[in-house]
Image (tube, rainbow, N blue to C red):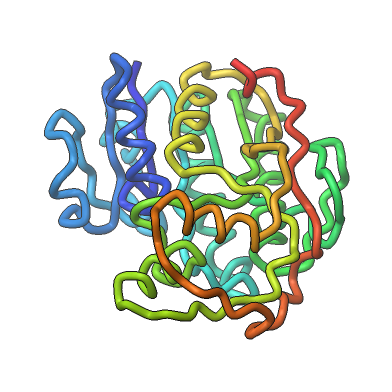
Amino acid sequence: MKVAVTGASGFVGRHVLDALRMYDVEVVAVTRNRLRLSEIDPSIRIVEMDIGDYDNNIFQQLGCPDVLIHLAWDGLPNYKSLNHFEIELPRQYQFLKHMVESGLPSMFVTGTCFEYGMQSGPLSTELIPQPNNTYGYAKNSLRQQLQYLKSTRPYNLTWARLFYMYGEGQSALSLYSKLKEAVLRGDKVFNMSGGEQLRDYLPVTEVAQQIVCLAKSQSDLGVVNLCSGKPISVRNLVEKWLEDNGWDMNLNFAYYSYPDYEPMAFWGDKTNPELEA
């Protein structure tokens, strides 16, 4: 099996490449800067490319993959930027449409829990998306476009809505990275929100394993939630990170206000049988 991975040098992409090493597959990593993948397994072929600027024979350049794991998306973590639907959405769709029309039989694309908008509680894939920020809107629009594309050119599509992740290589702006940086600096106090919001978190290594398993199935699964299915307060999560790593830090709650683009309590409804394997 041949697998191509876009966004391969990103936070999730690097862990997906590691997870793919466990299987007998031929892997092509797509990145805008090959230097960011200088330390990966030499058996992985690197293609340096921007999905907004590709050759007409890009499908052949990627080795005519059996499945594309599409992780690439620019402009994060600014969830409110207009660039998500003004620039990123059209270039994403044109690239994926070109791949399908060139012969790609199966595609795995990452969506986001922000497609659900301000809906609270356990979020099922049966819920009607109600995105309330431009990132969630653009992602959901891309999903709809790809589903319409299937009516003219059939192919297998799995759209996996990611919830929250943590682990090595995460953005310096993430909660986990900020906490770790504060510990390494020797800070005695860590400023954060009130911490009472309920979220759905998974280690990125587990997310990567699930992505690979779903993509390798080459199935037409539609929308799935990639989540734990178990809500945890941000406060309890941070305290768990401190305990698990043996970090000594006092937490200063309510220093920051809660985000206005997400509800206080939401988590994924993990009712996808494919994710229980």
229 vs 241, left or right, is right
Q: Residue at the location (56% across, 59% down)?
A: 239
Residue 178, image quadrant: bottom left
How far across and how far down the image is residue 8, in percent? 34, 46
How far across and how far down the image is residue 45, in percent? 19, 35
226 vs 11, left or right, is right
Q: How many labels does the image show?
A: 0
Residue 138, image quadrant: bottom right
In which quadrant will I find the C terminus?
A: top right
How far across and how far down the image is residue 144, in percent? 72, 45
Identify whether 160 is placed above or below 257.
Answer: above
Q: Residue at the location (70% across, 18% down)?
A: 273
Q: Residue at the location (76% across, 76% down)?
A: 260
In which quadrant will I find the N terminus?
A: top left
Identify whether 246 is placed above or below 196.
Answer: above
Judging depth in this view, the residue of 255 and 229 nearest the camera is 255
Does the rendering let one see residue 239? yes
How far across and how far down the image is residue 18, in percent? 30, 34
Residue 25, image quadrant: top left
Q: Residue at the location (34% across, 26% down)?
A: 64
Identify whether 203 is placed above or below 115.
Answer: above
Does the rendering let one see residue 103? no
Judging depth in this view, the residue of 125 and 227 nearest the camera is 227
164 vs 125, left or right, is left
